[in-house]
Structures are given as structure tokens and as C-alpha cells.
Amino acid sequence: MQNIFSEVDRLQDEINQHRPLSAHLKQQIKEYYRIGLTYSSNALEGNTLTESETKIVLEEGITIGGKPLRDHLEAQGLSEAYDFMYEVIASQTITIEQIKQLHRLFYYRIAEQRSGVYRTEQVLITGSKYPTTVPDKINTAMIEMVTRLNSLRLNLHPVEFAAQLHKEFVFIHPFIDGNGRVARLLLNLVLLQAGYNIVIIPPIMRAEYIRSLEKAHVEDRDPVVFVAQMLQETQKDYLRLL
């Protein structure tokens, strides 16, 4: 699978030649991707805010006429979870508490009592023929996932590790809602921890994204290739910014 990563690593080497960046430029890039990631990740789940509307909501605190209140709350919550993602980059690990906190920050405006709390009822993934983990096995499944993947981390390319974590989290689907948003934050957290760039999955790629996850129930190559391709696009964008 190594050939999948050659272009990713080439682009990352090019990015690294520009480092270290000034504190001002790093902050500008962080804010740039805050809008892109918040918009795209929410749009993948049906949020109707456009990218420019998301920017207005987050930067000016203005509500958009005719748009549902929940769409605004999702933008605010995901932006707050995005900040937490940056706070734990230095930890160089993934923990259950980090995962719960990402969900808590995203979801507490929507349903505070369910934010950061594992679901107690069965849910279905739309468009998938595979079941999610039953509620009474979620806690054990999450502990096993985090323990096993953290132990494998040094043996996997960061893109493969990120794709594996994202895939397994989605398969468990531990929360009543917001699992896709948290999965994409986790995907980006482990890439940032490894010194790589953020991945943004455009809404236009939604069908291909879902297909890659569905195929991942049988074999892992598709989601890894998909994440690598999306990362390459964001790396090229990053280089354009520089």
C-alpha cells in the first residue's frame, strides 16, 4: 500500500520546506481551515449553510434568515470542537475522553444531556447494509478500538492510521448523533499530530466517501485511498496559500 502514500509524502515534504511558519501565518491558516472544515463536514450531513454563510455565522455571530436554528448550532459547535482538536495535538495519542469531549463540544447546544454520552438505543447508518455496534457493547468496543490502534500507530503510515480510526469509529457509531462530524475531527487530529495537513471532504464527494466506508467492511484499501486523495487536494491548497 506504500505507493498510495508517495504523492502525499512528496507534497508534505514540500510543505515542510516552508516551515516553521510565523505565529501570525499559522493562525491565519488555522482560521482558514476552520471555515472550510466546519462547512464541509456539516454539509456532508445535510446542513444547509453555505461556506460564506458559515463564515458569517462563525466570525460575525449573525444568524442567516430562512436557515434552521440547528444549522447555526451545528456550525458553532463544530467550530468549538475544532479548537479543542488543536488543543490536544501535542498529546500524540487518542483517548476516550478526547473523543467524548469532541462530541460534547459539538453537541451540547443541540442536546446537552446527550452530549459526550454513548447512545442507549440502536441506530442505523443511512445507505449501509451493515449494523452498528449494539448499545451495551459500545463502551467495550471503544476501549478496544483506542487501545489497539494506539498500539499499532508506529507501524502504520499516518494516513492509514487516520483512515483506520475514522472507519472503526464510524462502524461503532457510539453517539446518538454527530458521529460523522466527530469521525472527521478524529481523522484530522491524528494527521495533525503526525505533522500532516488537514483533510477536507467536499460535499460533492459525499457519494464516493460513503461508498469507500461501505467497502471498508470487506477490505481497507478504499477508505485509505480516499483519505490520501482528499489529503493531496488539501495539501495543494495549503501550498497555494503559502
Image (spheres, grey):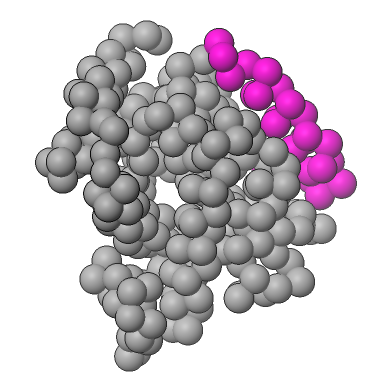
Q: Identify the residue at horizontal 26%, vertical 44% (top origin).
A: 22
Classified by dominant secondary structure, the portion drawn in magenta counts as helix
Query: Is-magenta flag for residue 232?
Result: no
**Label total for image:** 0
Q: Identify the residue at horizontal 38%, vertical 82% (top origin).
A: 61
* Position of 78 relative to 216 (above/below): below
Q: Identify the residue at horizontal 76%, vertical 58% (top origin).
A: 117
* Position of 89 relative to 38 (above/below): above
Residue 151's x, y, as percent? 68, 18
Magenta residues? Answer: 130-155
The answer to whether residue 202 is visible is: no
Q: Quadrant of residue 58?
A: bottom left
The answer to whether residue 112 is visible is: yes
Q: Is residue 146 left or right of residue 184?
A: right
Q: Is residue 66 left or right of residue 242?
A: right
- Toward the right, the furthest residue is 136
Residue 189's x, y, as percent? 50, 40
- Toward the left, the furthest residue is 240
Q: Identify the residue at horizontal 70%, vertical 31% (top origin).
A: 146
Residue 47's x, y, as percent? 41, 68
Q: Quadrant of the N terminus?
A: top left
